[in-house]
Image (cartoon, helix red, strand yellow):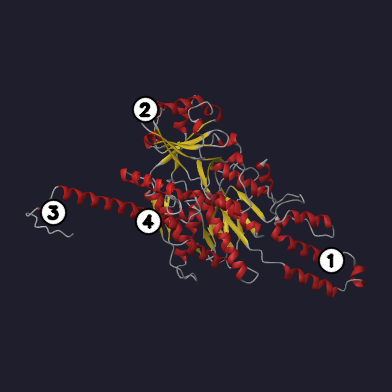
Amino acid sequence: MLVMINRFLLSPSSSSSCSFWPNNRPTVNCCSTKIAIKLLSSPVIDCQYYYKRQKASTAVVMALTSPSSLSSSMPAQQVVEEEDEKKEEKPPSNEVTVVGAGPAGCLLAIYLLRRGFSVNLFDKREATISQPGELSRNSYSYSMVLASRGIKALEGAGLALPLTLLNPLAGSCRHLANGTMRFNDYPSEPGFQTFGTSRNALVGYLQESLLLGRYPKLKTYFGYELVSLGEKKNIATFRAFANSNIQGMKEELVEVKYDFLVGADGANSAVRSQIFRLEERNPHSSNKQEPLKMDIQHNVQNLKSLYIGPLVARKSFLHPYHDRVQGWSSLNLLFVGMADGSFWGGSFHQDLVSATTSLEVEQKLRQHAPEVLELLLEENPNFAEDFVKQPPISSGSAIILSHFHHDNILLIGDAAHAMFPSYGTGCNAALEDCLIFDKLLDDFLSSGPVGKVPFDEVAAEFTRRRRADAHVIVNLNTTRELFPRNFLGLMQMQLLTTLHRWAPRFFKLRSFNQLWSDMPFTEIKLLKSMEDRFFYGILFGLGFLVLSGILFLLGVRNSPSLNLKPTF
């Protein structure tokens, strides 16, 4: 159904009067039914404007199609005044181009459409189909954790993911080499939410929300990649992606004029590359900020995905812990339970990912996780052969930018602050970008004059508000400092968890647990610093007391050879 709708949307030559393309709207006439149709298919914020526009247009059409009435009941001057009034009432179009139809790009498009903006949405991939049968075998999808900050951003756009896509997570379960399991509970306090889902399921839901949302100001272009951005005019050029399988695509090149352009096209952002190109060709532009600088660190690890279907999973040892993230440290392997009872997972273990024969795959799994191998073979007898053929998924890069904008061009999500998947915060941070941008629009639209949005000022303010937070979470995922990395780290985790349980009013949840809340990342970093000072201060104090006791027991204070004088 989604493919059919998408193909319909991609056909500007469609003759249907219900086309979602703004240029193909029904012609204005005096029929109140068509006015109602347009009102119902438009964002709520735009309904009053369309009603006024239709009312004025109706009078003009009646006058122009009836010469007698034009001379008797409505003078020509009045008709001109009606037309002028209609032009004056028409608000600025605020044309926005969004590059990238992933989680951040789709969510931002929904926010903008709800405000009545015109949106052109481009992606070089085909539309994602949100069906379990399609997703389960897609090696290019992967499991992910959706936390409070991501949920809050979705709710801000009036969205609520169906329960068929979300599996509530209670914590994690580590499978140790000696056969035992170690459990860690996620916070259950108000304001903390953690769900397991898949990236394709989330993207499919957001794309369906766009395509089925009957937004008349939306145009979608799946299978198109960015070629260039104009240096003087706000024109973006796209071309049909060579690997696209979309049928009926007629235009090789598409040019769109924009008032604002958003790059939500991932870690290898084409929009970001175009910003570098624009600044190199025109270093003395009106843009007064410093040139864009990027610090990038590549992750050498690759991922291959694993899948255990619901029928096999429900009979397995994993089923009682379906609400916990399952981990095997020896294989750097994770499984996340899905709402349908299945387990999605993958391994970053390079010996396993780079195996060239099915025998190598089976030997490595049999050595470190034999029970997992049995389930994988039960699900798919040809699992080992398919795993070898499966193309690895890049673990991405850690990217820190000096700023996220260039005039009226903005970068969000991984295009602005890509990070390693250490904590599973990348998608949640990207969705939060959309919520922050929408709040900025509120500030500018409420304080400024009605008319064109100063997108260059909004983009600059987004950088000011988001940069510190983004840099912190990228660094935290790179250093992994929120994880207990040694025996002292485990002691610190246990102490802080116990103190919070005994006195929650005085001791907050650990900084690591705050990742699942909507606490700003800069505050999480500050909380981690306070935890370290508190814990190591206690250790120093205890060490001083123990050393003093030992010296006292040995009688060092009375030793003439040390010539020590008592101080008390």
Image coordinates for residue 182, horizontal then vertical, percent: 40, 36
Image coordinates for residue 513, horizontal then vertical, percent: 45, 48
Is 323 above or below relative to 206?
above
Task: Identify residue for label 3.
Answer: 557
- Residue in view at x 57 percent, y 45 percent: 203
Residue 288, labelled with which disc?
A: none
Mark whose residue sits in front, 2 or 1: 2
Q: Could you tell me which secondary element the residue under label 2 belongs to?
A: helix
Check disc 1: other Cα within 10 Å, few if <14, some if 14-19, many if 20+: some
Residue 393 appearing in the image: yes
Amino acid marked by disc 2: Gln
Amino acid marked by disc 3: Arg
- Disc 2 to disc 4: CB gap under 8 Å: no
Question: Which image quadrant: the N terminus?
Answer: top right
Mark whose residue sits in front, 3 or 2: 3
Q: Could you tell me which secondary element the residue under label 3 belongs to?
A: helix
Task: Identify residue for label 2.
Answer: 367
- Residue in view at x 37 percent, y 34 percent: 330
Q: Earlier in the sequence, mark 3 or mark 2?
A: 2
Amino acid marked by disc 4: Met
Q: CA distance from mark 2 to mark 4?
A: 42 Å
The image quarter in which residue 173 lies: top left
Residue 126 appearing in the image: no
Task: Identify residue for label 1.
Answer: 59
Q: Is residue 297 left or right of residue 230?
A: left
Task: Identify residue for label 4.
Answer: 530
